[in-house]
Image: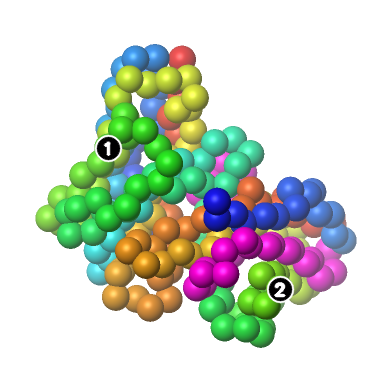
Amino acid sequence: DAGVTQSPTHLIKTRGQQVTLRCSPKSGHDTVSWYQQALGQGPQFIFQYYEEEERQRGNFPDRFSGHQFPNYSSELNVNALLLGDSALYLCASSFLGNLNNEQFFGPGTRLTVL
Amino acid sequence: QKEVEQNSGPLSVPEGAIASLNCTYSDRGSQSFFWYRQYSGKSPELIMFIYSNGDKEDGRFTAQLNKASQYVSLLIRDSQPSDSATYLCAALYGGATNKLIFGTGTLLAVQP
């Protein structure tokens, strides 16, 4: 049973470019949440997808957008990259019907913006 | 502003001792609380969750919740050098979405 997977592992971009990060949830999970973790900080909630729709987003600008596919996998897109977007991007997988609401993280994508 | 606060540490304990990690939260609407362990350069790994007042034990780990004091803690018994990591406390805010609000984490160093 594969856990949460993310790709790519590392990415280097320059300011102004666009990036797409990908996530596949655990088998049986239907909800994907995205978090940004800057160095020395806790993860910050970006948004959550369920049934191919964005349910809620955190305090992130519209440059951050996402998508969820029928197979529950998800993409995070960031446009017009800024130096401050350099961070570890984490995808968390969960099952909405689980009353305990446990979220399991993938290995993350390390984004560096130069 | 919903917040979760942790002492950043480092918390240094000798091998075999009990490590006590603490967390406070601001929003009384929080339903459940989670402890994640994060090794340097890796992603957070779920250790335990708790949603009822009192203690919850799982192996060497005990989570404690006091909703009246808005306080959550994690005890690690018989600490091992392999427990050295950053421990993240997170509060779950339900309603329309189940998003986690994280603290900044406490760095634990277990000395051999």
Question: Measured from the top left, where is residue B90 in percent x and y?
Answer: 56, 60
Disc marking residue B69: 2
Circle 2 SS class: loop
Quadrant hosting residue B110: bottom right
| Residue type, numbered disc 1 | Ser
* Lateral position of residue A81 relative to residue B66, left or right: left
Q: Which colouring convention does the figure follow?
A: rainbow
Q: Residue at x 63, y 39 (%)?
A: A40
Question: Measured from the top left, where is residue A77 in percent x and y?
Answer: 28, 34
* Lateral position of residue B64 relative to residue A37, left or right: right
Question: Can the viewer see residue B2 in this picture?
Answer: yes
Q: Residue at x 56, y 41 (%)?
A: B41
Residue B41: say if magenta. yes
Circle 1 SS class: strand
Residue A101: say if magenta. no
Task: Give the residue at mark 1.
Answer: A65
Q: Residue at x 34, y 76 (%)?
A: A98
